Amino acid sequence: MSAQGQKIYKKSGQKPTELESQVARALTDLEITAKDLAADLRGLYIVAAKQVDVGNNKQAIVVFVPFKLHKRFQKIQSRLIRELEKKFSGKHVCFIAQRTILSKGYARKERGQLRPRSRTLTSVHEAILDDIVYPTNIVAKRTRVRLDASKLLKVYLDPADQKDVDYKLQTYAAVYKKLTTKNVQFLFPQDA
């Protein structure tokens, strides 16, 4: 198995796409060259990567990581995003945990067994929203229902991080729309 192959794991029989291979190669290069990230990157791998069109001829890379390794990725996520955005010039990078959604009628092992709350559609979409904006915190959410019955989710982010993430708000909205098909608007609360 090549060094790049150790940074991406696919189900048996599946080949990684070109983008996934590039991300895996970039992670391997970072493990070799960046001494401050080398120890933290050892043992970490990705499961998928997708490219999302943001608009204005910009693109974002969404990297899916195993749920079990997500906390370890979050420890180094800000440094890792900064380094990957340098390697993939002009593209924003988001890390999202690979989660499972179970339908209401999934086959239970025992009678009366409940579906875990963390596997519901609502819970997974909330977790994706938190993953997209990490390390910024969400301070408020509002759902606006328009007269034509369409919904718009307004997400207010921590104003302390405004200068760090202000230029990524359009990327966050495009990635969330692509993954969940829900309209979202990211804002910062106005001081009263």
Image: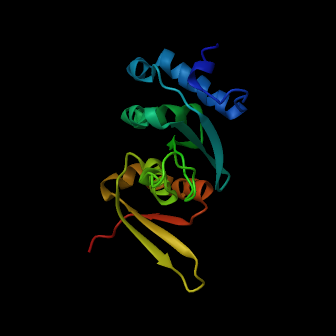
Residue 70 location, quadrant: top left
Q: Residue furthest top?
A: 1
How far across and down, in percent of the image, does residue 171 sit?
A: 55, 53
Looking at the image, residue 191 sits to the left or right of residue 120; the answer is left
**Residue 132: x %, y % from top left:** 48, 49
Residue at the limit of the structure toward the left, as seen here = 192
| Left/right of residue 85 with respect to residue 2 in the rendered view | left
Q: Is residue 179 left or right of residue 82?
A: right
Residue lying farthest to the bottom in this orientation = 147
Q: How is the image coloured?
A: rainbow
Q: Quadrant of the C terminus?
A: bottom left
Does residue 186 sit above or below 118 in this rendering? below
Q: Quadrant of the N terminus?
A: top right
Q: Quadrant of residue 7?
A: top right
Seen as rendered, the residue at the extreme front is: 111
Q: Position of residue 35 (x, y in %)?
A: 41, 17
Of residues 25 and 100, the one drawn nearer to the viewer in this rendering: 100
Could you tell me which residue is drawn at 72 percent across and 31 percent down? 18
Nearer the observer, 15 or 39: 15
Which residue: 68% across, 34% down?
19
- Residue appearing at x 56%, y 66% in the figure: 183
Q: Residue 173: x percent and y percent?
A: 54, 59
Residue 92 or 101: which is nearer the viewer? 101
How many marks the image carries: the answer is: 0
